[in-house]
């Protein structure tokens, strides 16, 4: 089993930056990728960014060039550095661990609110 704890959300002005953290614990050696998703009010959860075990990254077109996903292995932590934030980035951001055989785990989410 894997536990994920997100932190770093809050209120930020448009154009500002915010860094989210996702700390993983448990059988982390079985994680194939850590992903960030977000869900805005009244909308479906959507993919934001991905970091594979091998270090490959992927981003949604809406955040490409503004968001950066990275990790710090010593702290079992994956970060989502968000820059040039827009009001439409307002959402609850979730950390997701993709495991073998289609298994996945989710964190509890952290709220990011971007004011205009």
Image (spheres, rainbow, N blue to C red):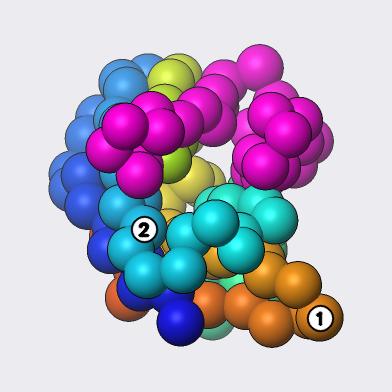
- Is 57 contained in the magenta span? yes
Q: Is residue 31 left or right of residue 91?
A: right
Res 14 quadrant in image: top left
Q: Residues within 10 Å of mark 2 (few under 14, many from 20)?
A: many
The location of residue 54, given as percent across then percent down, is 73, 34
Q: Is residue 31 above or below residue 76?
A: below
Q: Earlier in the sequence, mark 1 or mark 2?
A: 2
Q: Which residue is mark 1?
A: 101
The residue depicted at 43 percent of the width and 21 percent of the height is 83
- In magenta, the rendered stretch is 49-77
- In front: 64, or 25? 25
Q: Quadrant of the C terminus?
A: top left
Q: Is residue 75 visible?
A: yes
Which residue is the site of mark 2? 24
Rendered location of residue 30, percent (x, y): 61, 63
Answer yes or no: is residue 92 visible.
no
Answer with left or right where residue 100 lies relative to residue 8.
Answer: right
Give the SS element for disc 2. Answer: strand
Q: Residue at x 67, y 42 (%)?
A: 53
Q: Does residue 4 sit above or below 68 in this rendering? A: below
The structure residue drawn at horizontal position 27% and vertical position 38%, both measured from the top left corner, is: 75
> In this view of the protein, which residue sits in the foreground, 6 or 89?
6
Mark 1 to mark 2 CA distance (whole Å): 19 Å
| Residue 99 occupies quadrant | bottom right
Q: Please rate how many residues cluster around mark 1, counting C-alpha atoms within 10 Å: few if below 14, some from 14 to 19, many from 20.
A: few
x%, y% of residue 112? 31, 51
- Name above or below for residue 100 compared with residue 48: below
The image quarter in which residue 21 lies:
top left
Indicate the secondary structure of the residue bearing disc 1: helix
């Amino acid at each position: 089993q894997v536990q994920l704890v997100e932190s770093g959300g809050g209120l930020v002005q448009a154009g500002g930056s915010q860094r989210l953290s996702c700390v993983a614990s448990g059988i982390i050696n079985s994680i194939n990728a850590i992903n960030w998703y977000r869900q805005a009010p009244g909308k479906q959860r959507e993919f934001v960014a991905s970091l594979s075990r091998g270090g490959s990254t992927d981003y949604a077109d809406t955040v490409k060039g503004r968001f950066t996903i990275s990790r710090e292995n010593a702290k079992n932590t994956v970060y989502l550095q968000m820059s040039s934030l827009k009001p439409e980035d307002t959402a609850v951001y979730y950390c997701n661990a993709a495991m073998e055989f289609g298994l996945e785990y989710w964190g509890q989410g952290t709220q990011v609110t971007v004011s205009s």
